[in-house]
Image (cartoon, rainbow, N blue to C red):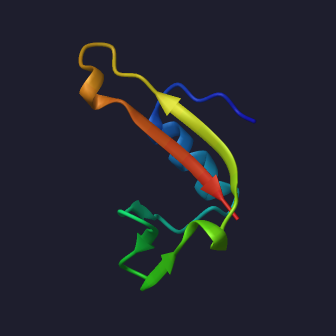
Amino acid sequence: MSIYENLIEGLGDLKQRRFTVDFKLDIDAINCNDAGIILYPSNFEIVENYRFEADTNPDDSSVLYSIN
């Protein structure tokens, strides 16, 4: 698992490693509106996860997941 300084760096590296679809979290699934894909928890596996903490505002924190 890699270590990234920030979310942009993590996204760039994962895209180079062929994690190319950007999903958004929904209530009971993840979805990619651009590709018309909806995945429920039984349809994917989390491979890696990264947490990014904001220095000034905790509300600006992010979590990045790579899935199969």
Q: Residue lying furthest bottom in this view?
A: 36
Instruction: Determine the residue positioned at 48% across, 82% down.
Output: 37
Q: Nearer the viewer, residue 10 or 51?
A: 51
Q: Residue lying furthest right in this view?
A: 1
Instruction: Determine the residue positioned at 65% across, 28% down.
Output: 3
Quarter of the image for residue 36 reads bottom left
Q: Nearer the viewer, residue 20 or 24?
A: 24
Name the side, left or right, on which 61 lies relative to 35: left
Q: Residue lying furthest top in this view?
A: 56
Count of numbered tags: 0
Name the side, left or right, on which 19 lies relative to 56: right
Instruction: Determine the residue positioned at 37% across, 79% down.
Output: 34
Quadrant of the rendering where the N terminus is positioned? top right
Quarter of the image for residue 24 reads bottom left
Residue 13 to residue 45: above or below: above
> How far across and down, in percent of the image, does residue 22 sit?
46, 64
> How far across and down, in percent of the image, does residue 14 sit?
62, 51
Quadrant of the rendering where the C terminus is positioned? bottom right
> How far across and down, in percent of the image, does residue 66 sit?
62, 53
> How far across and down, in percent of the image, does residue 33 sit?
36, 78
Residue 49 to residue 53: above or below: below
